Image (tube, grey):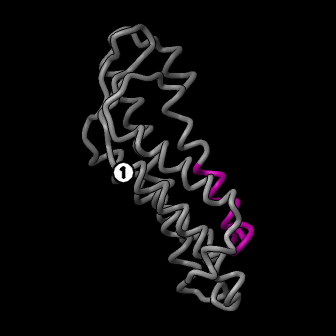
Amino acid sequence: MNHLLTHTPVYVWMILALVVARGLVALRERETTLKKLCIIPAIMLPVALLDIARKFGLEGLALGAWVLAVTASMWAVWSLGGRQIAAGGAPGTVRVGGSVMPLVLMLLIFMVKYATTVMLVTAPTLLHSAAVTSAACALMGGANGWFFGRLLRDVLDARAAGGGIAQADIIAA
C-alpha cells in the first residue's frame, strides 16, 4: 500500500486537496449565483465521462450503466430532494443551504478514478470485468446525476423563490 501511495504523482494529491477544499465550501450555507452553481456539475461531467471513455469505452455496458445511474439519481434528487435554495440578499443571487453531498460525491468520483487507474496499472484484466465496469460507471453516473438533479431542482426553486432573480439569470445558468 505504501508503494502505491508513494508512486502516485504529486498532481493527484493536489487534485484531491482541491476536491476537499471545494467540498468544504459546500458544507456551509452561502450566497452565490446560479451560474456558479453550474460549475461543479459542469466539471464533474467531463471528468467522469473522459475517464469512462478512456478505461471502458463509451458504449455497451459502460455507457448503459452510466446512463441508467445518471437517470435514476437525477430523477431521485430532482423529485424527492427538498428545497435548499432561497432568494439571496443581492439581485441575481441565491442562498444555498450547506450539504455534505457535494464533498462525498466529488470524493467518490476521485476514488473511483484513482482505484480504476490503480487497476489499470496493477491488474488491467480487471477493467474487462463486467462487474468492475458496471460498478465504476454506475458510481460515477450516480454522482453526475445527483449534481445535475440538484442543479435542476435549485434552478426551479430559484425561479419559484423570485426575490430579484431575473429570468435571464436562470436561463444563463
Secondary-structure class at tag 1: helix
Percent coordinates x, y for residue 69 in the rendering:
47, 64
Residue 157, by quadrant, is top left
Numbered disc total: 1
Residue 5, by quadrant, is bottom right
Percent coordinates x, y for residue 154 in the rendering:
38, 33
Task: Name the main secondary structure of what is drawn in magenta.
Answer: helix
Query: Relative to 31, is 57 on the left or the right?
Result: right
The vertical placement of 91 against 116, above or below, is: above
Percent coordinates x, y for residue 163 in the rendering:
32, 11
What range of the chain is rendered magenta? 44-59
- Which residue occupies the foreground of this view, 53 or 71? 53
Image quarter where the N terminus lies is bottom right
- Which residue occupies the foreground of this view, 137 or 156? 137
The vertical placement of 89 against 160, above or below, is: above
Query: Relative to 75, is 67 on the left or the right?
Result: right
The residue singled out by tag 1 in the image is 101
Q: Who's the residue at 30% across and 23% down the image?
A: 86
The vertical placement of 29 against 2, above or below, is: above
Asked if residue 137 lies in the magenta stretch, the reply is: no
Query: Relative to 151, is 63 on the left or the right?
Result: right
Query: Relative to 173, is 92 on the left or the right?
Result: left
Asked if residue 50 lies in the magenta stretch, the reply is: yes
The vertical placement of 46 against 134, above or below, is: above
Q: Who's the residue at 49% across and 42% down the image?
A: 22
Q: Specify the amino acid type for callout 1.
A: Met
Percent coordinates x, y for residue 99 in the rendering:
32, 43
Image quarter where the C terminus lies is top right
Residue 134, by quadrant, is bottom right
Q: Who's the residue at 57% across and 22% down the image?
A: 172
